[in-house]
Image (cartoon, rainbow, N blue to C red):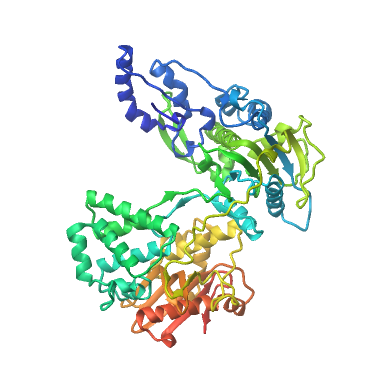
């Protein structure tokens, strides 16, 4: 059986086809069977090589009987009514390439399975009002909050998902919802090896086993809750050579078992979250014992280990449409965040693919200027083929988004005056085009956002059959690990507390997806630099390809900033150095962007991309964070505080800001 076959690529097909040919011959003699499952309408992985046309041809290539299915066993009929109204793209996507519409084919009307007939549900499209005082994104997010409140989704224990196109859009929505007291999480792959204080400290422990002479690693361990396990004289301790001998003799699983035994014997209390993460480490240890890996490989494995995890009950899930494929939710909200980009966005056009008559790649042509590929016939044909592929991919993506809901789908659009456009070549234009002539709007208005209902099917109060049960969210954070009696320490982040709440003052996360993404990108570019050679600049600095590279390249033209990257060869430079340590009665968790150790002194460098009017403003925001890092570095390294320099590199002001 081959599932999700519409996402199969040509290279994959060439590998498996000989085996299927053999099986087809056996099938002819009643010695086997071939079952291929797929849905061309869900071909959302063409960007990584998936070829939906393979699915169209597989039945003839392998002489298979073909059967279609337009019955949904997930969604109630009101949800499918919206799908039917939008996804007949021959009607709702005027102006798109003929090839894209032909590839989509004739749309079969979807019906729910017999066991779902008569079950209540709803599908609605809302439009935020026109206003000059509130941003379009804020109004769309407020409308989503209105829907959550009206349906009582979280109070009723209904699985609720907000689907978006990009991770940045997900961050925008999460920031708005959490700022307004609505529990929400972006569903993504979780680095389960190091996403907890326990995991980070286990990483330090194994680094200590690898490099026992590294004073920084030793310092981190001796200022962590694992200190009793390595400190001579403590009842739970073992010397380095004993730990290393246990590893060499019995393997990683034996070391993990011994660590857990000694932690518990010392009175450490683990939360359920940390027991789960400890089990992850133990399971991985058992696997690598069978494979046999070096200590360095083991450390890299646990640093890179990820797992898809669902948030706890009673929380709004936010994810990209691609990640939602194959999943189903009681309620799905589809908000338009940001501009409505066309399916075939020319900004993403980098090359054309030339294929032969057998649909095999014949060559790749770098895309010339728009004037060239829209006027020269050969390029115009390649451009039309590219547009058709992008538009078909957009059709599939919209279809996947609309078919995730079990009971209700809510689409939220920002205000836009209906000018009766004749072209619908983007996701939200197709949505607007599909409902223009249906006249299914109501006079209903959402209370806080003021959004009006453009389209409604099904029963408005469908959710009444679900009783309101307040869901208590499981405590999955690590705030109390480890509870060392008689003192219970609270784990905090230097960038996460107000000045009144702790000796640290945090930097407020704005929740704006674009700003957060740019900040991460800028940090990543700075991280590429170990030492700067002004006479031999890297290619990205000479010819920046991204906004982040341009910003960093401009910063490196500033002498005071450049000087932080010209340390002597004797200096030890650490980038993105994680910190987990106890500071007074607080357990500090954070990352030092750049740490330079040299000749009994240290420099802590923190890159800041937030807007500021003056250096004093940055000092006020971030001094407590850097001072906390300095105290920890001092305790770990033994360097006096007065010999630890703290510096902010501001990409906004294009200058260095020393912290006293």
Residue positioned most to the top? 29
Question: What residue is rendered at 55% in x and 54% in y?
Answer: 473
Q: Is residue 3 above or below residue 548?
A: above
Relative to residue 542, is residue 343 drawn left or right?
right
Q: Position of residue 133 (x, y in %)?
A: 77, 58
Q: Position of residue 419 (x, y in %)?
A: 78, 38
Q: Is residue 69 above or below residue 190?
A: above
Pick the residue in front: 72 or 16: 72
Pick the residue in front: 465 or 251: 465
Q: Is residue 381 above or below residue 34?
A: below
Pick the residue in front: 629 or 554: 629
Q: Is residue 370 above or below residue 73?
A: below
Q: Looking at the rendering, which quadrant does residue 547 occupy?
A: bottom right
Question: What residue is rendered at 26% in x and 56% in y?
Answer: 253
Give the quadrant of the N terminus. top left
Q: Looking at the rendering, which quadrant does residue 445 occupy?
A: top right
User: Is any part of residue 194 visible from this angle?
Assistant: yes
């Amino acid at each position: 059986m081959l599932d999700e076959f519409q996402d199969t690529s040509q290279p994959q097909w060439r590998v498996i086809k000989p085996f299927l040919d053999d099986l087809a011959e056996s099938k002819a003699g009643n010695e086997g069977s071939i079952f291929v499952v797929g849905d061309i309408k869900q071909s959302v992985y063409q960007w990584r090589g998936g070829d939906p046309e393979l699915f169209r041809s597989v039945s003839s290539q392998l002489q298979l009987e073909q059967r279609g299915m337009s019955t949904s066993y997930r969604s109630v009929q009101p949800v499918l009514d919206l799908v039917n109204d939008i996804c007949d793209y021959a009607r709702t996507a005027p102006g798109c390439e003929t090839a894209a519409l032909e590839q989509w084919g004739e749309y079969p009307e979807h019906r729910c399975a017999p066991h779902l007939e008569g079950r209540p549900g709803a599908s609605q499209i809302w439009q935020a009002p026109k206003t000059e005082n509130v941003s379009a994104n804020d109004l769309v997010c407020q409308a989503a909050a209105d829907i959550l409140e009206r349906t009582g989704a979280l109070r009723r224990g209904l699985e609720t998902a907000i689907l978006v196109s990009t991770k940045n859009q997900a961050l925008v929505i999460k920031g708005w919802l959490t700022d307004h007291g609505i529990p929400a999480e972006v569903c993504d792959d979780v680095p389960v090896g190091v996403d907890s204080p326990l995991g980070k400290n286990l990483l330090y422990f194994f680094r200590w086993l690898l490099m026992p002479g590294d004073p920084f690693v030793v310092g981190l361990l001796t200022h962590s809750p694992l200190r009793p396990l390595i400190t001579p004289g403590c009842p739970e301790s073992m010397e380095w050579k004993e730990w290393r001998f246990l590893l060499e003799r019995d393997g990683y699983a034996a070391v993990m078992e011994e660590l857990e035994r000694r932690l518990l014997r010392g009175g450490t209390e683990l939360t359920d979250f940390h027991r789960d993460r400890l089990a992850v480490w133990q399971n991985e240890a058992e696997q690598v014992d069978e494979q046999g890996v070096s200590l360095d490989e083991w450390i890299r494995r646990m640093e890179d280990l990820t797992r898809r995890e669902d948030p706890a009950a009673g929380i709004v899930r936010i994810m990209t449409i691609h990640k939602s494929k194959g999943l189903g939710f009681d309620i799905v909200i589809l908000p338009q965040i940001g501009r409505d980009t066309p399916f075939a966005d020319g900004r993403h056009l980098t090359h054309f693919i030339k294929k032969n008559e057998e649909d095999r790649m014949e060559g790749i042509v770098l895309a010339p200027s728009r004037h060239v590929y829209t006027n020269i016939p050969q390029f115009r044909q390649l451009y039309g083929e590219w547009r058709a592929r992008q538009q078909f991919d957009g059709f599939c993506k919209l279809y996947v988004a609309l078919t995730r809901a079990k009971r209700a789908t809510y689409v939220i659009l920002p205000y836009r005056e209906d000018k009766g456009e004749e072209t619908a070549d983007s996701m939200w234009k197709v949505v607007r085009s599909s409902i223009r002539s249906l006249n299914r709007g109501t006079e209903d208005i959402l209370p806080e956002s003021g959004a009006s209902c453009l389209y409604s099917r099904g029963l408005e109060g469908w959710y009444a059959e679900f009783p309101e049960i307040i869901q208590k969210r499981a405590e999955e954070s690590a705030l109390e690990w480890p509870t060392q009696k008689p003192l219970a320490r609270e784990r905090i982040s230097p960038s996460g507390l107000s000045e009144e709440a702790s000796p640290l003052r945090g930097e407020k996360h704005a929740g704006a997806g674009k700003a957060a993404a740019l900040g991460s990108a800028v940090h990543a570019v700075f991280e590429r630099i170990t030492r700067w050679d002004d006479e031999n600049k890297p290619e990205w600095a000479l010819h920046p390809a991204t906004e982040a590279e341009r910003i960093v390249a401009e910063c490196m033209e500033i002498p005071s900033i450049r000087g932080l990257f010209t340390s002597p060869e004797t200096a030890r430079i650490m980038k993105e150095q994680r910190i987990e340590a106890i500071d007074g009665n607080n357990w500090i968790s954070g990352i030092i962007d750049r740490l330079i150790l040299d000749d009994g002194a240290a420099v802590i460098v923190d890159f800041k991309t937030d807007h500021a009017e003056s250096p004093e403003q940055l000092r006020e925001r971030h001094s407590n964070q850097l001072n906390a890092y300095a105290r920890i570095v001092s305790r770990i390294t033994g360097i006096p505080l007065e010999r630890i320099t703290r510096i902010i590199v501001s990409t906004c002001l294009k200058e260095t800001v020393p912290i006293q």
